[in-house]
Image: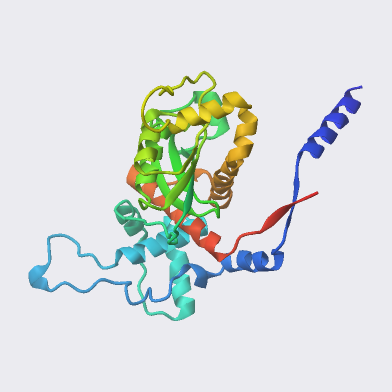
């Protein structure tokens, strides 16, 4: 009896899951191969900006002088993150790359990655677009992970913490904005910052879950003149501005009235709310490719480490993505 029930549940689960097929498999397969190429991650023209200009002795400051440019340190850290190498192994990897390419360039010491990594200003590569759909969500990243045996034996320690990664993703999977905070910052507050990071006139639609259903989120959307705000109100939500007042109705009240006229599920289908799964797919890709654990110890280096993974993720997106469609 138990076996029959189990088989029946598996059959129902299989029927509910949609199957997808990739149209551009040959092109996507070539893009996956290019991701492993060292030439793909080492930008052209890096040699010219690898070392900074030598400062004359009369103008030198106290202490050691900066030898390598920020671009050089960032490139080394990016290569180490893509190939999942720690600081010392990253130095050895870049050394071998230069030796094989016969480049007469010195490689920064691994301590330079740690010391200057927190001061790097990592900018996401984004394309210029007239219209952007901002799909917002957040996820947790583990810092100082502990083994299962240690937790059972001695419990969690104060050094076991989590960071919160907030991202804004477009429909094509491009990460347009990102913010790293501790777990005490709510999603709506971070969502305001994500919108402010993007050009004023580009965002025409916002898709987010109920955690962003707050006044401050709607205020910035109205100020930015966002045309469509697809944030489902809470189930116990009340009308904010009633219809007998002057002026345009509030976007949240319009969503709430539309839900009351039909159903919450139908409303989500009508506005295309389920495209929000794209941001969940992006965060899943980030964790599968680069891991969900942060290795850096200082918060500044942790932010740099996460931003480098998002930068690499955008490069992979531009390189080629699968074009899939549901199979009937």
Look at the picture and state if 170 lies above or below 46.
above
Residue 110 appears in view: yes
Q: Residue at x 12, y 62 (%)?
A: 61
**Is residue 137 or residue 242 the one in the foreground?**
242
For the residue pair 248 and 296, the one nearer the viewer reads as 248
* For residue 5, above or below residue 59: above
Name the residue at 55% across, 65% down. Answer: 319
Task: Name the side, left or right, on which 83 lies relative to 51.
Answer: right
Q: Residue furthest left?
A: 58
Q: How does the figure colour the protein chain or chains?
A: rainbow
x%, y% of residue 57? 11, 72
**Which residue is at 43% across, 61% downward?**
128
Residue 142 image point, x, y percent: 48, 38
Q: Position of residue 326 (x, y in %)?
A: 74, 50
Report the quarter where the N terminus lies. top right
Q: Is residue 295 left or right of residue 15?
A: left
In the rendered image, which quarter is residue 325 located in?
bottom right
């Amino acid at each position: 009896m138990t076996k029959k029930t189990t088989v029946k549940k598996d059959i129902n689960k299989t029927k509910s899951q949609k199957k997808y097929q990739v149209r551009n498999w040959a092109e996507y397969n070539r893009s996956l191969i290019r991701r492993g190429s060292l030439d793909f991650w080492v930008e052209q023209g890096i040699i010219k900006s690898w070392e900074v200009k030598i400062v004359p002795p009369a103008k030198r400051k106290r202490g050691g002088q900066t030898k390598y440019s920020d671009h050089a340190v960032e490139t080394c850290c990016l290569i180490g993150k893509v190939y999942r190498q720690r600081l010392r192994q990253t130095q050895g990897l870049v050394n071998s790359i230069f030796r094989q390419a016969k480049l007469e360039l010195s490689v920064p010491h691994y301590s330079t990655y740690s010391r200057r990594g927190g001061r790097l200003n990592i900018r996401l590569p984004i394309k210029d677009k007239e219209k952007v759909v901002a799909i917002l969500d957040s996820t947790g990243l583990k810092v100082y992970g502990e083994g299962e045996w240690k937790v059972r034996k001695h419990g969690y320690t104060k050094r076991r913490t989590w960071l919160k990664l907030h991202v804004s993703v477009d429909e094509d999977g491009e990460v347009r904005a990102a913010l790293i905070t501790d777990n005490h910052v709510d999603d709506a507050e971070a969502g305001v910052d994500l919108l402010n990071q993007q050009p004023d006139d580009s965002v025409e639609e916002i898709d987010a879950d109920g955690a962003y259903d707050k006044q401050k989120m709607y205020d910035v959307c109205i100020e930015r003149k966002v045309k469509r705000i697809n944030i489902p109100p809470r189930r116990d939500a009340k009308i904010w501005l009633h219809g007998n007042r002057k002026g345009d109705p509030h976007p949240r009240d319009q969503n709430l009235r539309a839900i009351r006229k039909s159903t919450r599920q139908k409303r989500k289908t009508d506005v295309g709310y389920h495209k929000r799964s794209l941001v969940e797919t992006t965060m899943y890709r980030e964790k599968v490719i680069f891991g969900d654990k942060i290795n850096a110890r200082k918060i500044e280096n942790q932010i740099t480490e996460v931003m480098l993974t998002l930068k690499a993720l955008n490069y992979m997106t531009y390189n080629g993505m699968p074009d899939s469609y549901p199979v009937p």
